[in-house]
Amino acid sequence: MNLEIFLQYFINGLTYGAIYALIALGFSVIYRTTEIINFAQGEFVMLGGMFMFTFTKICGLNLWLALILTILTVSIIGIIIQQLFIRPAINSPLVSIIIITIGLSIAIQTTAMLLWGKNSLMLDHFSKIETIKITDEIIIATQNIWILAITIILMFILHYFFEKTMLGKAFSACASNPTAASLMGINRNNMVLLSFFISALLGGISGAILCPLTNVNYHIGLSFGLKGFCAAICGGIGNNIGAILGGFMLGIVQEVGAGVISSGYKDAIAFVILIIFLVFKPSGILGQKWTKRV
Amino acid sequence: MKKILGYFAILLMILSLFANCAKKEEQSAPQVEEKIKIGAIFAYTGPASFLGEPEKKTAEMLAEKINSQGGVLGKKIELIVKDTAGDPQKALNAIKELVQKDGVVAIIGPTTSGVSLAIKNEMNNMQTPLISCAASEDIVVPIEESKWIFKTPQSDRMAIEKIFELMKEKKITKIGLITADKGFGLGGAKQAEKLAPQFNIQIVANEKFSSEDPDVNTQITKIKSKKPQAILCWDTDKGSAKVIKSIRTMKLDVPVYMSHGIANDGYLMAAGEAGNGVILPCGRLVVLDQLADTHPQKALLKSYSDEYMAKYNEKPNQFGGYAYDSLMILVEAIKKANSTDKEQIRSAIEQIKNFSGTAGTYNFSETDHNGLDKSAFCIVEVKDGKWVLVQE
């Protein structure tokens, strides 16, 4: 096996890993506060791509302005969804809420289909120079660098937010013990709202930075949601660092596996990893044992 | 209050049930035998909807036109369109409903090769003619298992033969193959593997990708390491756009050949600049303006294109053309058989010769349920984001 080719697979895997990590984080953040698995998470990614297309290609806005607007729009959609659909049902059994999120996913997809049509839409890369050639075998798309850089910056910001700010600490408190947190005067509803805001924001960003590399159409969210979910489970759902590790692990193993073994088994590789984790370490890389709250 | 509402809801439901029954009786009583019912199943939602939608629109437009010209055998046709969403299970339910409940005489569609293959057996069991709008040759081969199955698009086998001929002219002997892991892509891969030795072509890399993969950089990296002289990519437009983008990103500078499945403007839109330079065999609709006026297909293509533009205010594509051909062939067969008996329609389709369609001239026979030959293809190259005719 040629080392250079192996490195190329690894680089491809890193990009996927970054995206999966962002989506897994989205799952994780909502799960921590509510124990809900939000199956509409992948749709935020799709919406991120779609709004990025709308703002850059249709409105002709500057890239960074478009990026900020995209993130804002998708986050607001996240808030609206929480207010309209999740909040009224927040005291229902978990299964009901999870089914609501599945319904939401279908509704968002269909709406996107009606708004943006059924064709794949193309976005421009962030940089004019699209690729950097290192050797004959190793070629890096500049968009890959953007994706990695933005992901890492975002992770530091989130880390700072959860560990150092009052709001972030309140959020963590609410996640680990909602009753005690509410006795301390933390409004759980607001924290749930915050979790949807953050996870929609993460989804929106990942869509906006990923879609220049691929294309965007109304049904890309589903597979990203699934892979992100895999990553979240592998990393230990509810654990932010775990989600990041899970995402990168999944992305890299999947791409290297596809390259070395066969691309026909690409998805199979991802799901075999999921099954291995579910059987041998259901709590994930960093997760605590699953316990039921009494 | 809630209880009352609940009762009210139940009452409403019961009422609506009655209303439905009443309506049905009303409809079915006088209209029996008045109309010829034709089923159509297209994937007008779901991942293949960019193919299914023009098919549905075309079929509906054409049915309207046929009826305004007096219908078939003095009866109006009633086109019952159902959505498959590209899902084999939904398609199976749809064909059962169409045949058993609606009592259609034949079905046109479905959109994709995978779904066509999935419903093949059931159509044979129900002994109802199906004219598929999907390209894989396996749909109508072997003929013993395809008694009731026909299809209008040019076969993948012929397209690949055409491409291999071009490659042979350019003395290309080593190619990298990249195909989608679904019906159409798998069919293409199978044909390419089978035909390559005949043209002294060696497939040095054989990769698959899924429609859900965001990019195929890994597959292209692998192909690149095998140093092929050309790439053959087999998928419809979305997937192919993804492949060509990755080929350009990975700087794999060899000629790229693709399938007739990309021949619609969706590919140009999704691939952008990266899409230039690709060579493919396809039907003549995309290069209608560049055809010589004397070309036998030009008049038909132009009238289809104009009517579609007038009705929907958008350009038609070859997929709509397949639906056009399917319905026209079916109508022709019904006229020929002078009956709506399924067996007679089936054998009448086999008798259709020299029938001009949007995809080419059809010559069906008992052993050929596609009816097209290689002359149905022209060679097109993508240049500056446009389809350019290379070989008529």
Image (cartoon, rainbow, N blue to C red):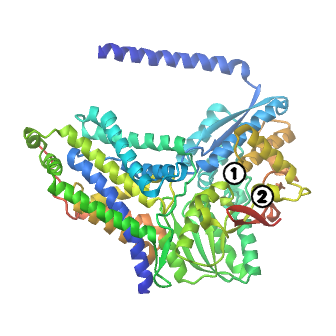
Report the residue at 43% width, 78% height from top. Answer: A8
Q: Position of residue B94 (x, y in %)?
A: 59, 40
Q: Residue at x 65, y 16 (%)?
A: B26
Residue picked out by circle 2: B287
Query: What residue do we see at 83% from left, 42% from top?
Result: B332
- The residue marked by circle 2 belongs to what chain? B
Q: Tell me the CA gap for discs 1 and 2.
A: 14 Å
Residue drawn at x 50%, y 84% is A136
Q: Is residue A239 above or below residue A31?
A: below
* Chain letter for mark 1: B
Task: Specify few, some or many for label 2: CA neighbours under 10 Å numbering under 14, 14-19, or 20 or more.
Answer: some
Check the picture and name the quadrant holding the C terminus of chain B.
bottom right
Question: Image check: B299 left or right of B28?
Answer: right
Kindly tell me whether residue B147 is visible in this rendering. no
Q: Residues within 10 Å of mark 1 (few under 14, many from 20)?
A: many
Residue at mark 1: B319
Whether residue B265 is visible to the viewer of this picture, yes or no, is yes
- The amino acid marked with disc number 1 is Phe
Who comes first in sequence, dot 1 or dot 2?
2
Looking at the image, is mark 1 or mark 2 nearer the viewer?
2
Residue B307's label in the rendered image is none
For the residue marked with disc 2, what is the amino acid? Val
Write down the quadrant of residue B65 in the picture: top right
Query: Where on the picture, by quarter, is residue B41?
Result: top right
Q: Are marks 1 and 2 on the same chain?
A: yes
Q: Across the whole image, how many numbered discs are drawn on residues?
A: 2
User: Whole-percent x and y of residue A182?
Assistant: 11, 39
Q: Is residue B63 left or right of residue A119?
A: right
- Quarter in which the N terminus of chain B is drawn: top left
